[in-house]
Amino acid sequence: MNKHINQLIQIQEMEIILRENEILHKNKDTEETANEILANIAEMKKALPDEILDILDRISSRYEIFVSPMINDTCMGCFMKLPVAEAIAVKNPHQWSVCPSCNRFLYADDKPLSRPDDSVAHYKGVAKFSSLDLMTRDLKSETHAGVLEEMARLAGEEEFVEDGAEFAKALLHREALCSTAVGLGIAFPHARGVKACGLTLAVGMSKSGVDFGDGETVNLLFVSAVPTQASMFYMDMVSKLARYFGKQENIDKLLECETADEMWKIMVKIGR
Ligand SMILES: [Zn+2]
């Protein structure tokens, strides 16, 4: 991948984290974290040529996703098929390119995986991104890293993500930027740019609770793999989850489930 496009992806990632923090940590003072991220963004921008910064300025006010994957020679931002020469240019690591139609920066990506089941067609809301196979009632691990690895392995084994170990690494990396625990014993660990069959949500429960740092003990984990083009779906899904599980009675309902089936019955109703 072109190095400038790589830097732009990192900037985009940071900006998305800023917005996520607003959704997830509404009741917490996160100004310090936000300032740190903003300083990071400013530093990364210094490494970009003026020509790219000009385009970035123009399009970042218009699009939340300003670096888009190109899959099958099609821009995933505006879904236009690129002319052959332009599509070849996107694949050339020695240059950077923008979509001739929407002006987003582009990088070449592979086709997403296809889902191991077709249940998705029947569901609406949150359940569209998840599956009964991704519900786990008793996490064995008792550490922060351990539960993330356990959940990532499950997503890999169930073939919702290509590589469970890579997914775990990405989750830990994201968690190191700032914790995804949001209080009330729930956390939303997630990783972007993971090869998965679209946005994927796995739900894990730990009866004894896991220490997420900062005095947060987490009982419920909503773990997501977020391919870049699904970033906005993720924001939407996570706000629905945050709203639903902002109520203690709904948390209790899930915690009281005795089987994965019961958990799934609750999950399919959210955001419909
Ligand atoms: Zn486009």
Image (spheres, rainbow, N blue to C red):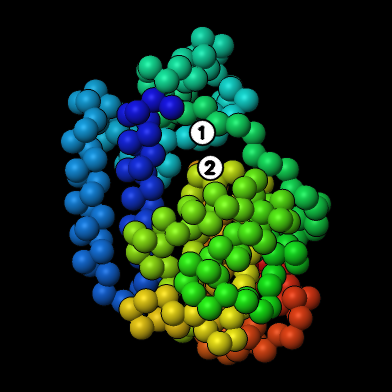
Q: Quadrant of the N terminus?
A: top left
| Element marked by disc 1 | strand
Measured as percent of width and height from the top left, residue 166 is found at 54, 49
Q: In the image, is 49 to the left or to the right of 171?
A: left
In the image, 49: left or right of 28? left
The residue carrying mark 1 has its beta carbon less than 8 Å from ligand 1: no
Can residue 95 be seen? Answer: yes
Compared to 209, does 175 lie above or below? above
Measured along the vertical axis of the image, is residue 99 above or below residue 252? Answer: above
Q: Is residue 89 left or right of residue 113?
A: left
Callout 1 amino acid? Pro
Q: Residues within 10 Å of mark 2 (few under 14, many from 20)?
A: many
Residue 29 percent across, percent down from the top left:
26, 74
Q: Which residue is mark 2?
A: 229
x, y percent for residue 91: 49, 20
Residue under the image location 52 percent in, 84 percent down: 209
Q: Are marks 1 and 2 in contact (CB under 8 Å)?
A: yes
Distance from disc 1 to disc 2, alpha carbons, whole Å, reads 7 Å
Mark 1 crowdedness (10 Å alpha carbons): few <14, some 14-19, many ≥20 = many
Quadrant of the rendered image containing residue 178: bottom left
**Residue ID at (20%, 59%):** 35
Residue 86 coordinates in the image, percent (x, y): 49, 14
Dot 1 or dot 2: first in sequence order is 1
Q: Is residue 134 above or below residue 207?
A: above
Using the image, determine if residue 93 lies above or below residue 102. Answer: above
Residue 152 appears in which quarter of the rendering? bottom right
| Residue occupied by mark 1 | 69
Residue 106: assigned label:
none
Residue at image point 78% right, 50% down: 116
State which quarter of the image contains the C terminus. Answer: bottom right
Q: Say whether residue 62 is visible.
A: no
